[in-house]
Amino acid sequence: NGNNLPTKQAVVDLYKSNRIGKIRLYYPDEGVLQALRGSNIEVILGVPNDQLQSLTNAGAATNWVNKYVKAYSQNVKFKYIAVGNEIHPGDSLAGSVLPALENIQKAISAANLQGQMKVSTAIDTTLLGNSYPPKDGVFSSSASSYIRPIVNFLARNGAPLLANVYPYFAYVNNQQSIGLDYALFTKHGNNEVGYQNLFDALLDSLYAALEKVGA
């Protein structure tokens, strides 16, 4: 989203020189995929939200996989295909996530790439109805009916649910009960429920919520 950016190859070279072994692309950029060839950098490749609806068509999903995944799979190290990012239960695209997931999975399997990568989607923690204490983490009633079939699909395919975890937003929206040191990993010792930092607590609340929907 910036300007005067370095070339795609320069970015990949920067990753390699700093031994950064993972990258997330929010949409398939063929220039970046070319630059990643032979780099051994693990890639999360995103299906952008504005393409979700079109990929509820199986043929379109096959074309997408052939163009952006299969064509590069020999020497680009795809780890996850993230089908949609932070779609919420009430969004107009909510009904497209699972069919698009299923179609991309079928296309990955048809290309015989299912052993190399997993197909998933990325959520944020606003889908949690309760996140504290972490052991009581649970998806909200509105999110539960949306996320449960997605989670079942992921479990059947041995794929993780991807999560964007933002301690910043949790802290900013709840400064009365969250200390800055707890949000910044600088708190000494653990709090009353055994956590030293907000990131770990948010992550564990997601695990607890997943457990409650059978994953």
Image (tube, rainbow, N blue to C red):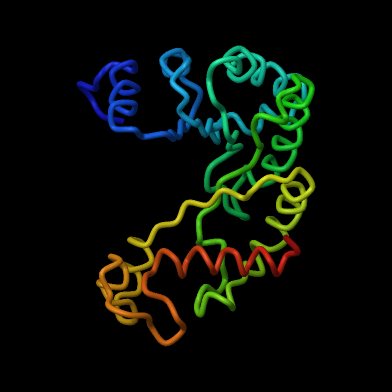
Which of the pair 182/94 is nearer the observer? 182
x 61%, y 12%: residue:
71
x 76%, y 47%: residue:
153
Q: In which quarter of the image is residue 205?
A: bottom right
Q: Where the N terminus falls, by quadrant?
A: top left
x 56%, y 28%: residue:
78
Percent coordinates x, y for residue 82 in the rendering:
58, 37
Percent coordinates x, y for residue 14 in the rendering:
28, 25
Q: Quadrant of residue 111?
A: top right
The residue lying furthest to the bottom in this view is: 192
Q: Where the C terminus falls, by quadrant?
A: bottom right
Q: Quadrant of residue 49?
A: top right
**With 69 as the anchor, is 22 left or right in this view?**
left
Which of the pair 48/208 is nearer the observer? 208
Percent coordinates x, y for residue 112 in the rendering:
76, 22
Residue 117 drawn above or below residue 168: above
The residue lying furthest to the left in this view is: 4
**With 148 as the anchor, is 16 left or right in this view?**
left
Number of numbered markers:
0
Percent coordinates x, y for residue 62 in the rendering:
72, 20
Residue 182 drawn above or below residue 161: below
**With 3 as the anchor, is 60 left or right in this view?**
right
x 60%, y 33%: residue:
81
Residue 42 drawn above or below residue 147: above
